[in-house]
Image (tube, grey):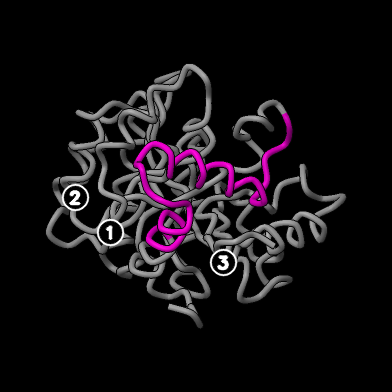
Amino acid sequence: MSLYTFVDTHAHLDGEEFSQDRDEVVKRAQEAGASAVLVPAINAASEESVAKVCQAYPGFLWPMMGLHPEEVGPDYQEVLSHMRSLLPGPYIAIGEVGLDFYWSREYMREQLDAFEQQVAWSVETQLPLMIHSRKAQHELVAILRRYRDRLPGGVFHCFTGNSIEAAELLQFEGFVLGIGGVLTFKKSRLPEVVAEIPLSRIVLETDAPYMAPVPMRGKRNESAFVPLIIEKMAQCKGITPDEVARVTTENVYRIFKRMKCENC
């Protein structure tokens, strides 16, 4: 059992990558110190798989609902309409949503519209946002600014940017940066950036099954690896792993108010 308790704020445990050993993955996460894992939907199909897997582990896996920017296509309006009809339901956040222009701008207009609609859902339901942003921060910030005073907060998932980009995102009150395995990568500049960010504006994540931390890099990522991120973050900030785990966990329950925490 880990010496500290933590929350993994982003893991795709409904994915096929975990279909053969999901029970074991959950057990390893709990043994490593996980008190909760947040599971995002990304499209119409995962809406069902996320609900099913979270129902199988009540009080430990927590569902989020959203349309991922890379899943935005010609039918996005129908998908969004269906998703909106399910909210708030059992969901603790709107996610995984955002903008991604890394590979293509083919559906740029549709992505912008889908993201803004889901930001509006957040305002309407007061569910926080789980935001994915890649090669799109300028456009993303422009949309968020239109709703700044009404947003309930959320997470900028998988943050890997520089100090200037971090400061621009953290201008939004109630939002934090999701830090994962990239922090441990040999050539990553994230340690220097994380050292400057208040711990009160950070949460931990894996993005499992992707981006496993060193020394597990290249393997399937899972929530049991979060202590490796905790230990690296403690080194970056010159504090104890226990403090990293404690404060980041407090941040989670401050943002995701529909979650229940017996020890908070």
How far is the residue under mark 3 from the one under mark 2?
24 Å
Question: What secondary structure is found at the residue carrying circle 1?
Answer: loop
Point out the stretch of residues depicted in magenta: 219-248
Q: Residue at x 31, y 37 (%)?
A: 195
Residue at 22 percent across and 60 percent down: it is: 151
> Residue at position x 43%, y 75% from top?
258
Q: Mark 3 is on which residue type?
A: Trp
User: What amino acid type is highlighted by mark number 2?
Assistant: Phe
Q: Main secondary structure of the magenta part?
A: helix
**Which residue corresponds to mark 1?**
153
Viewer-proximal residue among 169 and 76: 169
Q: Position of residue 200 (x, y in %)?
A: 29, 56
Q: In the figure, residue 26 lies in which quadrant? A: bottom right
* Left or right of 160 on screen, residue 137: left
Give the residue at mark 2: 172
| Residue 86 coordinates in the image, percent (x, y) | 50, 69
Please, is residue 113 above or below residue 91 in the view? above
Q: Position of residue 22 (x, y in %)?
A: 79, 56
Would you say 124 lies left or right of 226 here?
Answer: left
Q: Is residue 129 above or below residue 166?
A: below
- Asked if the magenta segment contains residue 202, the reply would be no
- The dot on residue 69 is none
